[in-house]
Image (spheres, helix red, strand yellow):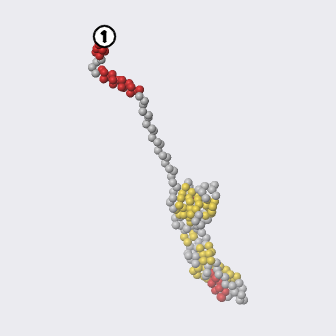
Amino acid sequence: MHLGISRRILTSRLPPGGAAACAAALAAILGGCATAPPPAAEPAPAPAEPAPAPQSEERSWIVPKTVNVRDAPSTSSAAIAKATKGTRLTSFEEQNGWVRVKLADTRTGWIRKDLLRKDDGCLPDRKEVLLEPPMLRMSDAPGPKGRVVVEADIDESGAVRTVRVVTNETGSEERAEAVKAEVQTVKFQPPVRKCKVSGFTYVYSRTF
């Protein structure tokens, strides 16, 4: 009989809906005690940008003064060849103030860029170069002695245009003509002055 009274008293103390509220509160408490989810992983860092690739544009250069061609783009690198004054070169790579060039023997090497001049189509100044010397005409026949001097006008291609006798100490027309014939065979690389190939006068003498 006392048990029935206690059950009625306990039940009467809970307000309407109290049982549901208690259940919700208990669920909230238990949920708070549950293990928290792990933190989200940090995003991976963006990959570093690659170093800029060396320039690979082909360019033409003129060597204004004889320079060393090196195995690598550094003054401490071994010199593998020399590029002489007036040489034309083509570069196909540039790196840290150096250019990589092709040599006439098909090798490649490096030259400091500030030691070269861009090839703008202007030839560097140069002196004339004798490519084919006069063809001497030897004769054992006796004749007058003396010196014969001739002048040959050389054109822009390096070939002889005209020849004239300026001195003939022998007095022999035959010997003068022989000297003129010797000069007719010469061939030059003509000189360049201020970007222009020019003709010139070649003086030749022969002593009999």
Q: Which residue is mark 1?
A: 2
> Vertically, is 195 above or below 166?
above
Give whichever of 163, 130 is nearer the camera. Answer: 130
Q: Quadrant of the C terminus?
A: bottom right
* Among the 4 quarters of the image, the one containing residue 160: bottom right
Residue at the spot 68% in from the left edge and 81% down from the top edge: 206
Residue at the spot 66% in from the left edge and 88% down from the top edge: 174
119 horizontally vs 179: left or right: left
Give whichever of 52, 118 is nearer the camera. Answer: 52
User: Which amino acid is tagged 1?
Assistant: His
> Vertically, is 96 above or below 189?
above
Position in image of residue 181 (x %, y %): 62, 84
Q: Quadrant of the N terminus?
A: top left
Q: Residue furthest left?
A: 16
Residue at the spot 63% in from the left edge and 81% down from the top edge: 183
* Among the 4 quarters of the image, the one containing residue 169: bottom right
> Vertically, is 173 above or below 15?
below
Q: Residue furthest top?
A: 2
* Among the 4 quarters of the image, the one containing residue 14: top left
Position in image of residue 165 (x %, y %): 63, 83
- Res. 118 in view: no
11 horizontally vs 191: left or right: left
Residue at disc 1, secondary structure = helix
Position in image of residue 73 (x %, y %): 59, 56
- Res. 46 in view: yes
Position in image of residue 20 (x %, y %): 30, 23
Residue at the spot 35% in from the left edge and 23% down from the top edge: 25
> Vertically, is 35 above or below 98?
above
